[in-house]
Amino acid sequence: MKSEMAERLLNGAVENTDGDDEGSDLKRRVWTEMKLMWRIAFPSILARVTSFGVMVVTQSFLGHVSELDLAAFALIQSILIRFVNGILLYDDEHPL
């Protein structure tokens, strides 16, 4: 059980177990931590930006087709986004 808890989530993470030079190489440790955070956060950021881009391109194409299609898409998209955000942000302890 303990070995499962000690398993690393990111391969290649450097861990300093000496404790001797705790404050001596702060810049290197901060840079290593930032690289690991970006490795986790970048796919999420990319997915958000591309999904927003798809919505913008779709709206611009529908705006050229007809006003009714653009209004229908805007209505459905706003309802869908609110529904999905409601599912993602749902919290039992702190309801909105």
Image (spheres, rainbow, N blue to C red):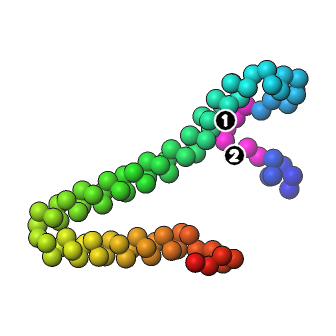
Identify the mark nearer the N-term, 2 or 1: 2
Q: Quadrant of the C terminus?
A: bottom right
- Calculate the distance from the C-alpha at mark 2 to the C-alpha at mark 1: 13 Å
**Residue at (17% x, 65% y) in the render:** 62
- Name the residue that disc number 2 marks: 9
Q: Position of residue 43 (x, y in %)?
A: 49, 47
Q: Is residue 14 above or below residue 86?
A: above
Q: Residue 70: percent from the left, percent from the top?
A: 19, 70
Q: Amino acid at mark 2?
A: Leu
Q: Which of labels 2 and 1 is toward the front?
A: 1
Residue, disc 1:
33
Q: Secondary structure at mark 2?
A: loop
The quarter of the displayed image where residue 80 is located: bottom left
Q: Is residue 60 left or right of residue 93?
A: left
Q: Is residue 38 above or below residue 22?
A: below
Whether residue 73 is situated above or below residue 47 in the rendered picture: below
- x and y percentages locating residue 50 in the rendered image: 37, 52
Q: Main secondary structure of the magenta part?
A: loop
Relative to 82, 68 lies left or right: left
* Segment colored magenta: 7-14
